[in-house]
Amino acid sequence: MTTQAETEQTEAHPPSQRWSVETHDPVADEWMPGTPHRNRDHAVKRYEALTERRPRWTDGTPVQRRIVRETTQYSVEEQQ
């Protein structure tokens, strides 16, 4: 288990997180990224707004969306 002192020595910056709403593109069969939000609540509100306003593609197919969290951790590498 890592101690607080060890973490402070190896961590260059505090970890960061951001959330986005991704939309699945059925033609390309891949997930398209959305605008990143620093706050999960904002991403949830965006998800709800998009689902309410645009629940289906123009051909009537339901739009698939998901909330994704990106976590970034910065660490100090040992010098050789």
Image (cartoon, rainbow, N blue to C red):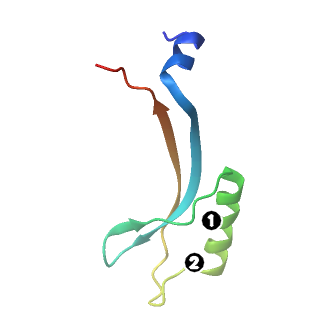
The three-letter code of the residue at mark 2 reads Pro
Image coords of residue 55 (percent x, y) = 57, 78
At x 71% / y 53%, what residue is drawn?
A: 41
Q: Give coordinates of residue 59: x percent, y percent.
A: 44, 90
Disc ID at residue 47: 1
Residue that lies at the very extreme toward the front in this rendered image = 80
Q: Secondary structure at mark 2?
A: loop
Q: CA distance from mark 2 to mark 1?
A: 11 Å
- Disc 1 secondary structure class: helix
Q: Residues within 10 Å of mark 1 (few under 14, many from 20)?
A: some
Asked if 46 appears above or below 27 in the picture, the reply is above
In the displayed structure, does residue 35 sit left or right of residue 1? Answer: right
Q: What number of labels is visible?
A: 2
Disc nearer the start of the sequence (2/1): 1
User: Would you name the residue on which mark 2 appears?
Assistant: 55
The mark closer to the camera, 2 or 1, is: 1
The image quadrant of residue 32 is bottom left
**Vertically, is 6 above or below 34?**
above
Q: Residue at x 58, y 41 (%)?
A: 16
Q: Residue furthest bottom?
A: 58
14 or 68: nearer the viewer: 14
